[in-house]
Structure formats: structure tokens, C-alpha cells
Image: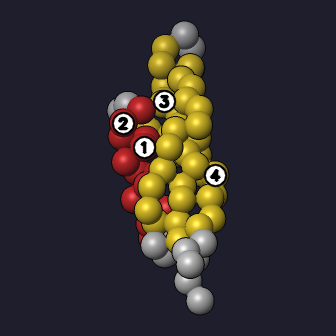
Amino acid sequence: MTVARISEISSVSKKSFEDAIVQGVARANKTLKNVKGAWVKDQEVLVDKGKVAGYKVILKVTFVLTD
């Protein structure tokens, strides 16, 4: 039997939403073992003085629990 858990994380990039996702998954993989997937729950643009300053994503990361 396999049991998985889902953790919610946020990630910010100055480049793009895609970069924020890649960085978030890479960082989650350093801490969590057996990462199997992730999906974007939400995304938003950070604005500073009327200009886009960053791209933020909220990710739900799925990882399999071990014994």
C-alpha cells in the first residue's frame, strides 16, 4: 500500500511563472523525499511602482511517505 501526503508551498521568481514552478519543485525536492508531482493551486503577479516585480505561485506538492 502506498500513502502520499500533500504539502503546500509558495515560490517567487523575477523571471516568470514557469521559473517560479521549477524553483519551487527543486526546493521541495531538497527537503521532501519521494516527490511524485505538483500542481499550481494559485498564481499572482507582484507589482512595485506600477510594474511587474515578480511572479508568485502556490504549489501543492505530492510526496510518498516511507516506513
**Considering only order in the chain, which callout, 1 or 3, is on the residue closer to the N terminus?**
1
Going 46% across and 73% down the picture, which residue do you hit? 34
Q: What element carries label 4?
A: strand
Q: Name the residue under label 1.
A: 21
**7 w.r.t. 49: above or below:** below
Q: Say whether marks 4 and 2 touch (CB < 8 Å).
A: no
Q: What kind of element bears circle 1?
A: helix
Q: What residue type is labelled 4?
A: Glu
> Disc 4 or disc 3, which is closer to the eye?
4
Front residue of this view, candidates 67 and 25: 67
Mark 2 nearby-residue class (10 Å; few <14, some 14–19, many ≥20):
few
Looking at this view, name the residue that lies furthest to the bottom. Answer: 67
Type of amino acid under label 1: Ile
Q: Residues within 10 Å of mark 4 (few under 14, many from 20)?
A: some
In space, the residues marked 4 and 3 are separated at their CA atoms by 19 Å
Look at the picture and state if 15 lies above or below 28: above
Say if residue 27 shows up in the picture.
no
Quadrant location of the N terminus in the rendered image? bottom right
The picture places residue 14, in percent across and down from the top left corner, at 41, 34
Give the residue at mark 3: 54
Residue located beneath label 4 in the image: 8
Q: Residue at coordinates 56% horizontally, 83% vertically from top-left?
A: 66
Please, what is the three-letter code of the amino acid marked with disc 3?
Answer: Gly
Q: What distance separates the C-alpha of mark 4 from that of mark 1?
A: 12 Å
- Asked whether the beta carbons under mark 3 and mark 2 sit within 8 Å of each other, the answer is no
In the image, what residue type sits under mark 2?
Glu
Residue at 48%, 30% in the rendered image: 54
Quarter of the figure with residue 46: top right
Find the distance from the CA under tag 3 to the CA under tag 2.
12 Å
| Marks 4 and 1 in Cβ contact (< 8 Å) | no
- Crowding around mark 3 (Cα neighbors within 10 Å: few <14, some 14 to 19, many 20+) is some
The residue under label 2 is 18
